[in-house]
Image (spheres, rainbow, N blue to C red):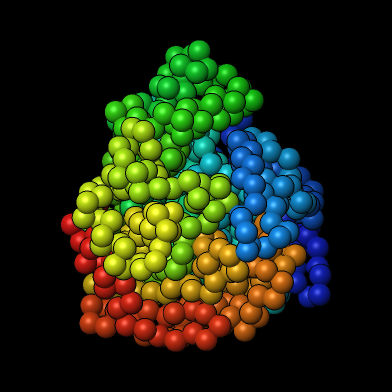
Amino acid sequence: MARTNGGSVRGAVTEGVHKFLGVPYAAPPVGADRLQPPRPHPPWEGVRDATRPGAEPPQVAPPRTGGPGAGAAEDWDDVGDAFGAVERGDPSTDCLNLNIWTPDLGAAGLPVMVWIQGGMFELSSTAVYDGTSFARDGVVCVVINWRPGAEGFLYLDDGIADLGLLDQVAALEWVRDNIAGFGGDPGNVTVFGESAGAMSIGCLLAMPRATGLFRRAILQSGAGHHVIAPPDALAIARDLATRLGVAPTRAAIAGAGVPRLLAAQAALKQDLLAHPDPGRWGLDVVTSTMPWQPTVDGTVLPAPPVECIAAGSADGVDVLIGTNTDDWRLWLIVSGAMSGITEEVLAGPVGTYGHQCLAAYGLAAQSALPAYRERCPGASPGDLLAAVQTDWWMRIPALRLAEAHWAAPARTFMYEFAWPSLGLGAVHALEVPFVFDTARPDAPLFGPLLGPDPPQELARTMHSAWISFATTGDPGWPAYERVGRATMHLDTTSSVVHDPRAWERAFWKDLR
């Protein structure tokens, strides 16, 4: 049993690891609190059961994607089925909760790692992330739920913005105030996350509300670029209200209820994908296909995160950031779109081909195509698009964040995850089970990506490096600096390489 500011919680112990699930960090966002910033959770009487997963945020179910194609793992399951195979709480607005794993409730001063999961800012589930291996190795691990989609990122220019990010801040405030009761050191907190979780961390590094809540940050395949401007966010909110048949106000949209809101949100996303008109949605929304993402509102997010970081907002935070070699190739394969990409598509207009053409990324096909062909000899049009998307989405934002931070009085480290899954490559999210030291074929969600025999030594290497960074600020390789740009190349044999992405940096130097 452990004590929190809200009351006592009873968890479970398995092989010496104490686990507490579904612990509330904020009040349920229901009734008058619907679509509002998080508030403190009221205290409870007695001992609260914390042995089962808590409720999850309302969210649109992930679409069926089909298999990844020839040569990939035959037991691939679509994302929705993989999530469904895990024990998890029911989706609910009573969802602002977190899970904790600790090796010793009586300990003091253990490093703390807080995981922020990805999901396109449209999904948020703690169900597939097990912190047992971190606790086993002396870390207090916390995994948090937060509101995605319209629930978390509806923007109406009404003085409220980025509720999903404010949820994350509230969870970190809870950690600051309560984690000592679980053996953790509130002064040695590392946030780590992947994809939209890493993009969230890029925002946290820029947010005044998050200052002082963490000492270190690990960003996996996500950085500080992908945010939305207020006019585009407001246009999306108005489109949502029209679909609901209500006024574009927070109270009216909240009053429509969760099922109708999710249905309208799903319809809006399908409309965006079917009709990728930059004049209607904004070019960045068409390119990202993410209508729900953090908004630069001037208060919660004062400016684009990378600009804030360059101005010193993250000066006291050590940063470890990296990408996967073939990051965005995953989505072209699992969607079945890879084989349909032709040179005509690559060179076509955004309004017709949306995020599948080079113009969506600010590239002129007549110059970009020859440049990428030379960089990637023998690549198919689909593979060329995957390389461009990986650079735009992941690699260039990571490099720019590292370079914005490297002058800070804190250290910056860079990695590239290069181990290729058969038929897929080193794709998006593939590194997550290695970080959690759960790289096995039956791992929830990620197992089908790994094949029958993932390299356990790589898992031990990455897991240990992440813990070392969280504990001491040093993952075990040289810092990323202007001279050398040292980057740990993570594969079955890992080694430091210097400035491995000089070509990409030069090509994208003056591009968005």
User: Which quadrant of the figure has residue 351?
Assistant: top left
Percent position of residue 290, x then y: 44, 40
Establish if 491 lies above or below 381: below
Is residue 191 visible to us here?
no
Q: Is residue 344 left or right of residue 259?
A: left
Is residue 491 visible to us here?
yes
Residue at the (21%, 67%) spot, across then down: 506
Which quarter of the rendering shows the N terminus?
A: bottom right
Percent position of residue 384, x then y: 38, 58
Q: Is residue 96 left or right of residue 292?
A: right
The total number of labels drawn is 0
Percent position of residue 232, x then y: 33, 32
Percent position of residue 20, x then y: 73, 59
| Residue most extreme to the left | 510
User: Which quadrant of the figure has residue 93?
Assistant: top right
Establish if 153 lies above or below 183: above
Residue at the (72%, 55%) spot, across then down: 21
